[in-house]
């Protein structure tokens, strides 16, 4: 992956791979996701970031991200995505690289799935977000 991790980036990742390479589920709205899932990067620094899974269906406490606020590959852009402010993962960059490679995520420097900055959820909405 030759691009920089940052807020708004969306990658397809396997949660088991994330966990195997040091990721931590800080909070979930029940059982954390287990299958191949889109994850949205909310914040990133030199070593890792905070990510939340995106869902294709509505659910209790899930907020929508409309289609017109998404860019990237057609299979991601079509339709709404939903996130829950109760689902948050702390993910080292190495874990994101390994987990997205295991899913054969196609993102790269020229084209990647992204959420528009004007529609990005803020960390203050996530109770499990680290303070400071």
Image (cartoon, rainbow, N blue to C red):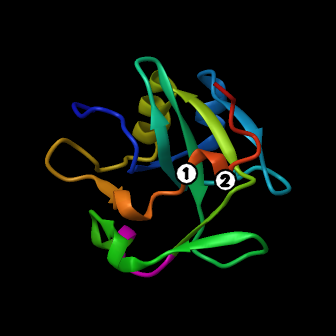
Q: Quadrant of the C terminus?
A: top right
Q: Is residue 7 above or below residue 71?
A: above
Q: Is residue 56 left or right of residue 131?
A: left
- x and y, in percent, of residue 40 in the image: 49, 51
**Residue 19 at x, y = what percent?**
66, 30
The residue under label 2 is 125
- Residue 125 location in percent, x, y? 66, 53
Q: Is residue 1 magenta?
A: no
Compared across the picture, whether 125 is left or right of 4 comes to right
List x then y, in percent, for residue 117. 36, 57
- Secondary structure beneath label 1: loop
CB-based contact (under 8 Å), mark 1 and mark 2 = yes
Could one spot residue 115 in this view of the protein?
A: no
Question: What range is drawn magenta here?
Answer: 76-80
* Residue at horizontal 24 percent and vertical 34 percent from the top: 3
Q: Please identify the dominant SS of the magenta region.
A: loop
Decide which of 48, 120 is in the foreground and name it. Answer: 120
Res 122 label? 1
Does residue 42 appear to the left or right of 67 in the view shown?
right
Q: Which residue is pictured at 39% across the width and 50% down the height? A: 8
**Quadrant location of residue 2?**
top left
Would you say 98 lies left or right of 75 here?
right
């Amino acid at each position: 992956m030759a691009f920089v991790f940052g807020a708004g980036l969306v990658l397809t990742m396997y949660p088991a791979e994330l966990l195997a390479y040091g990721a931590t589920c800080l909070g979930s709205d029940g059982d954390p996701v287990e299958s191949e899932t889109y994850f949205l990067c909310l914040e990133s620094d030199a070593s890792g970031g905070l990510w939340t899974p995106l869902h294709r269906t509505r659910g209790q406490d899930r907020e929508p991200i409309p289609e017109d606020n998404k860019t990237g590959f057609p299979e991601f852009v079509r339709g709404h995505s939903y996130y829950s402010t109760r689902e948050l993962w702390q993910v080292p960059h190495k874990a994101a690289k390994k987990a997205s490679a295991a899913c054969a995520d196609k993102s790269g420097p020229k084209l990647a799935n992204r959420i528009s900055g004007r529609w990005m959820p803020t960390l203050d909405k996530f109770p499990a977000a680290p303070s400071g």
